Structure formats: C-alpha cells, structure tokens
Image: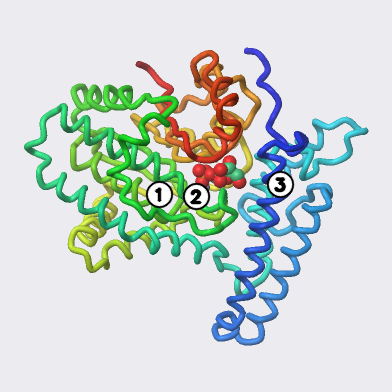
C-alpha cells in the first residue's frame, strides 16, 4: 500500500489547522481560566482555603500552557501518573524520533494538528488533576449544560416526534419505517453542527425545530450512504433475528447527544437493532464531548422534564440501561492522539469490542479526522483507502464538515466546491453519511 499523505498541521500558514492553533485554542484556554476564576467562591465553600489554593495552582498551570503554545515552545512530556500518561509520553517520543536533528523538537505549530490539539485538552486535564481537591472539576460542564438548556424547544419537539412514532410503530409499513429511519439519521447528522469547540466555547445551541428543515438541508449532504445502512440492518434482521448490535461512538453532549439517543431509541423500538453500545470520553474533551457524567446527567434531566413525552423518553432510556439493551463503555483510547488505524495495536481490547458490532456509527468531525488520520488526502480518494486498514466492522461516519479534510467525493466535486465556496470544509454547513463495509 502507498504511504499515506502528510498530516494536516499548523505549518501551513492560513490553513484551518494554523488558525485553530493561533486563535481558537488560546481563546478556549482563556475561557477555561475564566471559568475557574468564576468558580472560586464555590471552591472555597466546598474545600475552604485549600480550594482557593487549588484554583490558583490550576490557573497558573493553564497560563503556562497558554504561553508555551503562543510562543511555539516544544511539546513537553506529561508529568503526572495517570492511566494514559506513559502512552502519551511514548507517542511524543515517537514524534521526536521522526524528526531530523535540524528540525528540533515537536512543537505546536510544527507537529501534526491532531496531535497538538488532543495534547492541549490532555494538558488542561493535567492542570486540573494536579490541583486537588478540585481535581474532579469539569471545566466545560457549564457550557455543555447550557447547550442542553438552550435547546429545550427542539428537544421537546424531537421527543414528542419520537413518542408519537413509537406508539404507531406496529402499523408503520416497511417504506414508512425506512423514511423515518432516514429522518432520524439526518437529525443526528445536523445535531453535529452544535459543537462548542468550533465556536471557541461560545454557546451554539439548536433553537429551531430541525425536523422541519430536513428537506431544505438535503442538498448539503455531500456523501449519502443512508441506503447502505438500511440494507445492512434489514438484512441482519432477515438473517440473524436474535441479536443485532449497533455501536455509536458519541461526540458532543447537549443537543447532539439527544439526537443520538433519539436515533438509538428508534433503532430498538423499530427492531432494526436489539442492543446499542455507546462510547464516550473518560476526560473533558474538545469542549463539548460527552463523558459518562454528561450522559447520565442528560438522561436524568430528560426524565425530570415537566413535558409528558420528553420525560417518557428519559424513563425509557433509563430502563434500556437497566435492562442492558443500552450499554455505555469508557476507554482511554478515545482521548489519545492516535489515528484509528493504530487502534488494533494500541487498544486491542477496544478493537475486539467494536468487532462485535453489526454496524458502528462514528459521530462528528473529530472522529472523522481520526478515521482518516487527519491527512492531506485528495478529495476523490476512496474512504476505504483513507481508513488505512481500520475495519473492525461495517462503519459509517456521520459528520458535518468542520476541518479541511474530506475523502470519497466524485472527481472534481471538491475542487468545484472550493471554487464556489472557499470555506465549505470548515463551517459545518455540509454533512456526510460515509459508509465502509460490505455492500
Ligand atoms: O468532533 P466535533 O465535535 O464535530 O468537532 C470538533 C471540532 O470543532 O474541533 C476541531 C477543531 O478544534 C475541528 O476539527 C472540529 O470542528
Ligand atoms: Mn466534539
């Protein structure tokens, strides 16, 4: 197989990677520092003087980090001892070994963007865990929760839609069922527009009812493999009958997570699947990504809604978890900097888990970057090739485009878009359902 192309990186001045490292990441760091400041009295109430000292320590570590970044200092090893520390430091050494002597050390604007951006979030976590007793503070929790509350109207509309569908599901014919499946897939796709790291942590919630916009948004789906997903699941149903497992590698909490849970509920209610496995992040990640706390918190909120159909969703979701029909998994691999083609080597247990799925849905932009290695692929390279050997089970990326990477387009399609709309890759306006697996 030919060597994969070079990584996206901050070396390319003016690129989205460059602008992210130069502007967006420092902005996120500043916001984190501000969040800690604002929680000062809460830390004092909870932990007394010690809490205040911890806040100071975390802020000084984060200010140091911001300075390292802005002056393009070398990437330094992690110092604390956490479950993933050695793997991170080995990864850093590996990148060091790739450089010639004249290149110096891995640096913020020089090394692969995927590496330095993941490293930044890991260093934020390091600053927090080095600052007990506030070492379990999630610096992004507030904005994730705010996104959920600001999206209330859309959430209620979606929950109502789902419950009305579920009541009638026995009478829905095959064609209608397919139509509903496609609708809920698209809702989950456009739910990915709402991540908070793209907006530099500034609120980005869903205020309109997305169900009514689906037809208008269709032209913006650049790769649409929804039919393959339908064939795959209906064929599984015809053949296997007993168990059909769909795994969802989650992305953002708040509104996007609701759209994913609605889809997951529909898969069970329609019997297109019999069990759903979710994967979240073990540490706060890329501002809005889902941790187990966010997952449980959101279901609890939905359950206690004073809207009848919304709370019915929460009650059902909790029941699915109790029955083991919904299973949540944690794994440190998801917050490492590795491309997914390295998973079978770095996290063979996780790879083996994913192999049990009949279909894996990868939500969001960062998952796409890791699936394709965040490299400068030509737009027309087949998705299968860009996956570079990562094929645990049939899989599909459901992503709105928020980074300068896209494969599997028709010849000339990417170039045409670039000519007419220079920012098409990074605004989240376009989306894909990109499938890889047997047809
Ligand atoms: O994975 P998500 O939530 O869809 O997007 C994460 C994201 O905002 O972070 C990166 C830049 O900071 C971009 O690649 C991408 O837009
Ligand atoms: Mn995200």
Residue appearing at x 73%, y 53% in the figure: 78
Residue appearing at x 71%, y 69% in the figure: 59
Q: For this rendering, which residue is in front, 204 or 75?
A: 204
- Disc 3 on helix, strand or loop? helix
Q: On the image, numbered disc 2 is attached to which residue? A: 195
Q: Is mark 1 within 8 Å of ligand 1?
A: yes
- Give the quarter of the image for residue 264: top left
Horizontal side of 12 relative to 417 (left or right) equals right
Horizontal side of 347 relative to 187 (left or right) equals right
Residue 388 % position (x, y): 57, 22
Tag of residue 365: none
Horizontal side of 103 relative to 257 (left or right) equals right
Q: Residues within 10 Å of mark 1 (few under 14, many from 20)?
A: many
Q: On the image, numbered disc 1 is attached to which residue? A: 256
Q: Residues within 10 Å of mark 2 (few under 14, many from 20)?
A: many
Horizontal side of 388 relative to 95 (left or right) equals left
- Disc 1 on helix, strand or loop? helix
Q: For this rendering, which residue is in front, 282 or 378?
A: 378
Residue appearing at x 79%, y 53% in the figure: 70
Tell me if residue 370 can be seen: no
Q: Earlier in the sequence, mark 3 or mark 2?
A: 3
Residue 298 % position (x, y): 36, 60
- Give the quarter of the image for residue 63: bottom right
Q: On the image, numbered disc 3 is attached to which residue? A: 21
- Please, which residue is most extreme toward the left here? 171
> Do tag 2 and tag 1 residues touch (Cβ < 8 Å)?
yes
Q: Residues within 10 Å of mark 3 (few under 14, many from 20)?
A: many
Tell me how the rendering is colored. rainbow
Q: Is mark 2 within 8 Å of ligand 1?
A: yes
Residue appearing at x 47%, y 24% in the figure: 391
């Amino acid at each position: 197989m030919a060597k994969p192309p070079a990584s996206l990186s901050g070396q390319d001045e003016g690129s989205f990677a460059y602008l992210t490292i130069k502007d967006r990441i420092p902005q996120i760091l500043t916001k984190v520092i501000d969040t800690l400041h604002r929680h000062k009295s809460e830390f004092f109430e909870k932990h007394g003087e010690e809490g205040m000292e911890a806040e100071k320590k975390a802020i000084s570590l984060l200010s140091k980090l911001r300075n390292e970044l802005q002056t393009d200092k070398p990437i330094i090893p992690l110092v604390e001892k956490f479950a993933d520390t050695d793997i991170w430091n080995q990864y850093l050494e590996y990148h060091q070994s790739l450089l010639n002597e004249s290149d110096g050390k891995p640096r913020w604007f020089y090394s692969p963007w995927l590496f330095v951006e993941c490293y930044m979030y890991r260093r934020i976590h390091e600053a927090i865990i080095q600052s007990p007793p506030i070492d379990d503070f999630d610096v992004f929790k507030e904005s994730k929760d705010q996104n959920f509350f600001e999206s209330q109207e859309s959430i209620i509309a979606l929950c109502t839609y789902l419950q009305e569908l579920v009541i009638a599901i026995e009478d829905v014919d095959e064609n209608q069922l397919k139509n509903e499946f496609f609708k809920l897939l698209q809702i989950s796709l456009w739910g990915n527009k709402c991540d908070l790291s793209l907006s530099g942590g500034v609120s980005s919630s869903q205020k309109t009812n997305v169900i009514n916009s689906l037809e208008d948004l269709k032209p913006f789906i650049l790769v649409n493999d929804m039919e393959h997903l339908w064939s795959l699941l209906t064929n599984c149903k015809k053949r296997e009958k007993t168990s059909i497992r769909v795994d969802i590698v989650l992305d953002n909490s708040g509104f996007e997570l609701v759209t994913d849970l609605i889809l997951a509920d529909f898969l069970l209610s329609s019997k297109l699947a019999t069990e759903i496995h979710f994967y979240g992040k073990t540490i706060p990640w890329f501002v809005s990504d889902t941790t187990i706390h966010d997952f449980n918190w959101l279901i609890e909120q939905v359950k206690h809604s004073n809207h009848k159909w919304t709370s019915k969703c929460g009650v059902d979701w909790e029941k699915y978890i109790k029955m083991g029909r919904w299973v949540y998994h944690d794994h440190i691999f998801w917050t490492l900097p590795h491309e997914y083609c390295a998973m079978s080597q770095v996290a063979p247990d996780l790879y083996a888990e994913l192999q049990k799925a009949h279909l894996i849905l990868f939500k969001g932009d960062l998952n796409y970057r890791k699936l394709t290695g965040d490299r400068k692929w030509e737009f027309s390279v087949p998705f299968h090739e860009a996956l570079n050997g990562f094929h645990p089970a049939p899989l599909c990326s459901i992503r709105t485009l928020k980074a300068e990477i896209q494969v599997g387009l028709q010849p000339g399609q990417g170039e045409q878009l670039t000519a007419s709309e220079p920012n098409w890759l990074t605004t989240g306006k376009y989306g894909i359902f990109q499938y890889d697996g047997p047809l």
